Amino acid sequence: MDIAHIKLKDGRTLLIREFQIEDKQKFIKMYESLSAEAVHWGMPPYNRERLEKGWLSNLQNLISIVAFYNDKIVGHAQIFKFPHPRLKATGDLIVYLHQDFHSVGLGTAMLSKLIELAKKEGLHRIGLTVVTDNKPAINLYKKFGFKIEGVKRDAYFGEDGKYHDEIVMGLILANSTSPN
């Protein structure tokens, strides 16, 4: 199993490794502890039932990593690998960070590790959608070479009661580089 120890901008040291089913309770606990700000542009609710039936029931099609701090999961990133032959070696990305770990380099560290694992598994393309208002996430993805491929107009209904555009982004792994 790949394990990485990273030091964040604020001096905290974390462990990043592949998700294991034994992490399930800590994984659910992280999602249940996310603030409204942390999931502002996500797709709540993040409850046990949704996590178990959605992400945790489909581990064979995931490249999934978690970040630990003081034996608690504080970050999760994954690529869902599409099983259909016509979508061979492609997948969709998600990243979630606990609110206490925003803007300290955790997203960069996790995305770097996840892309490394995706390359090892032979993935060709990683895609994602992100709400246009989520500037920190867009900047992170651009830093890794993700390109804007299109806009889905009024595709996300926000907590503010308004529709927001989503950007479709993609990264072809043969051309990707890791930022310093």
Image (cartoon, grey):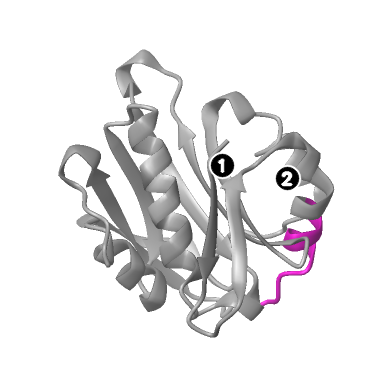
| Number of the label disc, if any, that sits on residue 51 | 2
Q: Position of residue 6 (x, y in %)?
A: 52, 65
**Residue depicted at x 65% and y 79%:** 100
Which of disc 2 and disc 1 is earlier in sequence? 2
> Distance from label 1 to label 2 (Cα)?
13 Å
| Span shown in magenta | 28-37
Q: Which residue lies at the image location 53% right of the left edge and 41% below the top edge? A: 2
Q: Quadrant of residue 56?
A: top right
> How packed is label 2: few (under 14 Cα within 10 Å), some, or many (20 or more)?
some
Identity of the amino acid at label 1?
Answer: Ser
For residue 147, above or below residue 93: below
Indicate the position of residue 57 as horizontal and vertical percent values: 70, 30
Mark 2: secondary structure: helix
Residue in front for this viewpoint, 138 or 111? 111
Residue extending furthest bottom? 10
**Do the residues bearing badges 1 and 2 touch, measured as CB atoms within 8 Å?**
no
Q: On the rendered structure, is 78 left or right of 19?
A: left
Task: State the quadrant of the C terminus.
Answer: bottom left
Image position of 99 with respect to 2: above or below: below
Q: Residue at x 68, y 77 (%)?
A: 36
Q: Nearer the viewer, residue 109 or 44?
A: 109
Percent coordinates x, y for residue 103 in the rendering: 48, 81
The N terminus lies in quadrant: top right
The residue indicated by pointer 1 is: 64
Location of residue 143 by image quarter? bottom left
In which image quadrant can residue 124 be found? top left
Q: Of tags 1 and 2, which is closer to the observer?
A: 1
Label 1 Cα crowd, 10 Å radius (few <14 / some 14-19 / many 20+): many
**Can the viewer see residue 133 in this picture?**
no
Residue sticking out furthest to the top: 85
